[in-house]
Image (cartoon, rainbow, N blue to C red):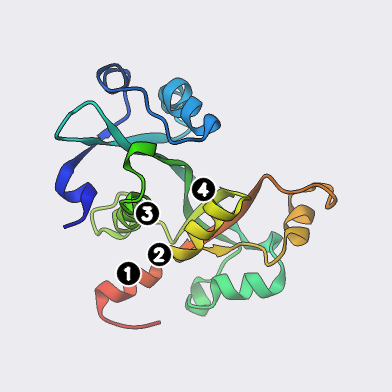
Amino acid sequence: MAFLESRCIRTVLTPAVLNCCEAFSCGNEDLDAFFVNDAVRYSQQLMGKTYAFVDTLSLKDIVCAFTVSNASIFTNYLPNARKKSIGRNLPWEKRDLIYPAVLIGRLGVNSAYKKRHVGSELLDYIKQWFVDPDNKTGCRYLVVDAYNQPVPLSFYERNGFKYMFSSEQQECVYRNIDSAEKLHTRMMYFDLMLLSSEKDGFAL
């Protein structure tokens, strides 16, 4: 049985949870600072909601945490090839310039719990969460601004995410960044219809 399912409980990341648990550290200073210092205020400003999985054996360890918020994919800004790729599996009458999405704004796994595939399990959880029939909002895609480093990029690639732009140069143009500069993050997406189709018993 998966680790998060068998040994953890999901909770909203609140001041009470932070006070009861050990300080969260995933090895990335920016992420650690956000979850510890900014996530609650971020939620209060309705900018995103942060959740945590807490180890039920200790009730002191935050195993992983993630933030989600509403987003959209504006295809009119994308290169033609990517625009066609993203809209390929939509009925013609449903194709539009804007597709509903959910942004995974932050995602971190406690350094003490790495090597247990928690990160991939967490992504699977989020994917299933937004294709669940009881989900309160329509959402076709998950999007993420992944750190432009080999480890996080390969992590999202292994979990089915694709690059929004085929090259960093294309993405620099879209984001109005000097192409001589290295991008800090790369935009990636996952089509949730892949999972919805599996549930419904048909293939795209």
Q: Is residue 58 left or right of residue 141?
A: left
Image height of 89 relative to 37, above or below: below
Residue at position x 30%, y 49% from top?
136
Q: Which residue reaches farthest bottom?
A: 203
Calculate the distance from the C-alpha at mark 4 to the C-alpha at mark 2.
Answer: 14 Å
Percent of width and height locating residue 83: 63, 70
Choose the circle earlier in sequence order: 4 or 2.
Answer: 4
Q: Quadrant of residue 132?
A: bottom left
Give the amino acid type for the residue marked by disc 1 in the picture. Ser
For the N terminus, which image quadrant? bottom left
Calculate the distance from the C-alpha at mark 2 to the C-alpha at mark 1.
Answer: 6 Å
Image height of 29 relative to 8, above or below: above
Where is mark 3, residue-wise? 123
Where is mark 1, residue-wise? 196
Where is mark 2, residue-wise? 192
Where is mark 4, residue-wise? 71
Q: Is residue 150 left or right of residue 123?
A: right
Q: Secondary structure at mark 4?
A: strand
Give the amino acid type for the residue marked by disc 4 in the picture. Ala
Give the amino acid type for the residue marked by disc 3 in the picture. Leu
Q: Quadrant of residue 75?
A: bottom right
Q: Dot 3: within a 10 Å radius of its alpha carbon, few (fewer than 14), some, or many (20 or more) residues?
A: some
Q: How many labels sit on residues?
A: 4
Q: Secondary structure at mark 1?
A: helix
Give the amino acid type for the residue marked by disc 2 in the picture. Leu
Choose the circle earlier in sequence order: 3 or 2.
Answer: 3
Q: Secondary structure at mark 2?
A: loop
Calculate the distance from the C-alpha at mark 3 to the C-alpha at mark 4.
Answer: 17 Å
Residue at position x 32%, y 18% from top?
15
